[in-house]
Image (cartoon, rainbow, N blue to C red):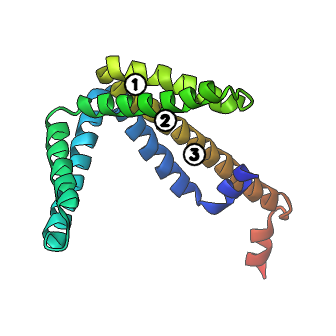
Amino acid sequence: MFFKEFDNNFKPQTLKMIALITSIIGVFFVLFAKYVGNIAIRISMIVIFAVMFLNIKMTYSYSGKIKKSSDVLTMLATVIVFIWPNLLVFILGLCLLYFSSLSLAKMIKLKSYNDKLKLIISIVGIILSIVCIFNSKTILATVIKLLGAILIAVGCFCFYQYMKSTRNEENELSNVDQYKFDNAEEIKEDK
């Protein structure tokens, strides 16, 4: 059902451009994964720093000591992550380890193993967090390459839809020509 709606919502030339752009971006992500990840993290840290700066500037006189100190620490953290982008993946790994192990510890403490999905997610979260902590550089590049592969797949799908819609238009035009009379133009000219 999605494919029929997807086909009807876009013109063929739009599908062609979407396919081309997403495929090129996907290839760019796959080829330059290390640089794309670092640049994306640095841009997001600049945005977070600007937001926190404006937040401090606007609410400084109304904020308490805890809010002021947390805002300053957040700005300091954005500067540190801007300098070392792989530190973000390390910090995310630590947070994921904390929350996954906390959830698993609660399940073990209560001996409630009925929720198999939660148990599996907690174990996978712990494993993934350990990988993020010890391989922060490669995980970032792997995630960017995965996004690139997804973009390439979307580009191929859009190109397939483009080819399908152009074939349908060609078939409709050939069906219209099928019912025309031979030499119809000559008969009109004689009159």
Q: Are there few (<14), some (14-19), or many (20+) residues within 10 Å of tag 1?
A: some
Q: Nearer the viewer, mark 1 or mark 3?
A: 1
Name the amino acid, label 3: Cys
Q: Earlier in the sequence, mark 1 or mark 2?
A: 1
Whether residue 32 is visible, yes or no, is no
Alpha carbon separation for disc pair 1 and 3: 24 Å
Q: Amino acid at mark 2?
A: Ile
SS at badge 3: helix
The residue to which callout 2 is attached is 152
Which circle, 3 or 2, is nearer the viewer?
Answer: 2
Evaluate whether residue 136 shows in this view: yes
Instruction: Label 2, secondary structure: give it.
Output: helix
Residue in view at x 52 percent, y 41 percent: 155
Sequence-wise, the earlier of marks 3 and 2 is: 2
Answer with the quarter of the image where residue 20 lies.
top left
Q: Indicate whether 92 appears above or below 55.
A: above
The residue nearer to you, when weighing 60 against 182, is: 60
In this rendered view, identify the residue nearer to me: 160 or 75: 75
> What residue sits 36% from the left and 34% below the top?
92
Q: Is residue 140 above or below residue 55?
A: above
Front residue of 152/133: it is: 133
- The answer for how far apart the CA atoms under marks 1 and 2 are is 15 Å
| Residue beneath disc 1 | 142
> Image check: 78 left or right of 102?
left
| Residue extending farthest bottom | 191
The residue labelled by disc 3 is 158
The image quarter in which residue 178 lies: bottom right
Q: Position of residue 138 (x, y in %)?
A: 33, 20
Query: Decide: marks 3, 2 in contact (CB < 8 A)?
Result: no
Badge 2 density bin: few <14, some 14–19, many ≥20, Cα 10 Å:
many
Residue 131 at x, y = what percent? 40, 19
Q: Residue at x 54, y 32 (%)?
A: 103
